[in-house]
Amino acid sequence: MDVLVTGGAGYIGSTVASALADAGHRPVVLDDLSTGRAEFVRGRRFYRGDIADAGLVRRIVAEHPGLRTAVHCAARVAVPESVARPADYYRTNVTGTLELAQTLAEAGVRDLVLSGSASVYGPAGAAGVDEDAPWAPASPYARTKAVAELMLADLAAATRLRVLSLRYFNPVGADPQLRTGPQQPRPGHVLGVLAESLRTGASFPVRGTDYPTRDGSALRDYVHVWDLARAHVAAVEGFERALDGRRSQAINLGTGRGTTVHELVATFAAVTGRPVPVVAAPRRPGDTAGTFARTERAAYLLGWHAERDLATGIADLLAWLERRPALLENPALVGSSR
Ligand SMILES: NC(=O)c1ccc[n+]([C@@H]2O[C@H](COP(=O)([O-])OP(=O)(O)OC[C@H]3O[C@@H](n4cnc5c(N)ncnc54)[C@H](O)[C@@H]3O)[C@@H](O)[C@H]2O)c1
């Protein structure tokens, strides 16, 4: 089926588009290339523009009369930038999402799969978080994701829009076929820093060693981006069932297992065969002990569970970083807002 993928030139959206195409669907990408890469949409039906451009969105639907479903990945996603420029984040992630959802719904595209985020959740205990866990979004970015999700649920309750919000935990890795991956040469997240340590030999800073976790370092639920992409295919194909009788539904996408920073470092060393020198460092402001996903709902409603382990995610990221310069025309260029 035809599926609109907003943000389909970005890290996750491009992977989702590949998974949809591999499953026999026809992705149509809308992306303004603010952080996305033109190379990631080569060979795709691609429209360059803003999600809030109603005229463009109407044209896309008119040119693809089979469109009934959209996967909405487009957003601004850099937490520190959201602290410095909150208005830009609310404009894209909230207002842009509102404009997009309304234009799509008026044009007959009423089923929306939203890139949600586990960053909406508050601190959680050792049991992980299910979809009903309390929220406490800790940054402007996380708050825009929270508002967007609540807003879409309100629209779904009052209109013919239907929404599946997939709340990602910590995406890692790259497309296993290495068609796409993180755009940046040096991804800023913890695995990117580890890859940089491997490249330079510098010690890896473990930021925070006194968290209430099994070894004192922060814990995250790292989920392979290809597993995430597969979940979107399941959501698109089984939209009605995943709603489970509701107008909107939230579903966690994680592995159901937490990994501490020390465990991540050990796995990284095992994958590369090289020890990683670590150094204890203070907690980063705003960071939390972290948690992991309860994944029962994803299993029940999507028939989905993560299949790839962390070692595979690390290996795929490293392979991508090696392949990346050959695949990108100007590898030094990253999106304008990163
Ligand atoms: N990467 C993560 O750790 C993570 C975790 C949880 C949720 N998410 C969500 O997943 C989605 C994708 O994130 P990502 O990591 O792939 O980021 P990304 O920056 O790689 O992708 C976002 C894409 O959206 C495009 N875009 C931004 N503003 C736009 C606009 N106004 N109009 C059209 N296109 C626009 C960008 O050019 C980019 O291609 C986001 O909604 C993000 O909030 C990401």
Image (cartoon, rainbow, N blue to C red):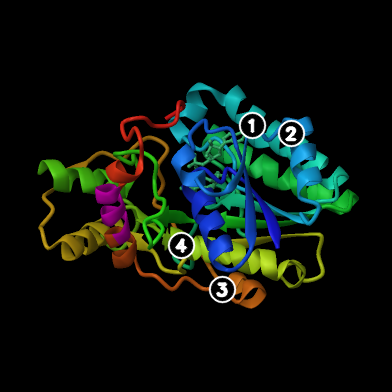
Which one is in front, 267 or 326? 326
* Residue marked by disc 3: 304
Residue appearing at x 23%, y 48% in the figure: 194
Q: Confirm whether residue 202 shows in the render.
A: no
Question: Is ligand 1 within 8 Å of the beta carbon of the residue shown at mark 1?
Answer: yes
Residue at the disc numbered 4 = 226
Query: Tag 1: Cα neighbours inside 10 Å, few (<14), some, or many (≥20)?
Result: some
Q: Are marks 4 and 2 in contact (CB under 8 Å)?
A: no
Q: Which mark is residue 49?
A: 1
Q: Earlier in the sequence, mark 2 or mark 3?
A: 2
Q: Is residue 318 magenta?
A: yes
Alpha-carbon span between mark 2 and mark 3: 34 Å
- The label nearer to you, 4 versus 3, is 4
Gap between marks 3 and 1, in whole Å?
32 Å
Which is closer to the viewer, label 4 or label 1? 1
Regarding residue 79, the answer to whether it shows in the image is: yes
* Separation of marks 4 and 1 at Cα, in angstroms: 26 Å
**CA–CA distance between discs 4 and 3?**
12 Å
Mark 2 burial class by Cα count in 10 Å: few <14, some 14-19, many 20+: some
Q: Is residue 31 above or below residue 212?
A: above
**Residue type, numbered disc 3:** Trp
Mark found first going from the N terminus, 1 or 2: 1
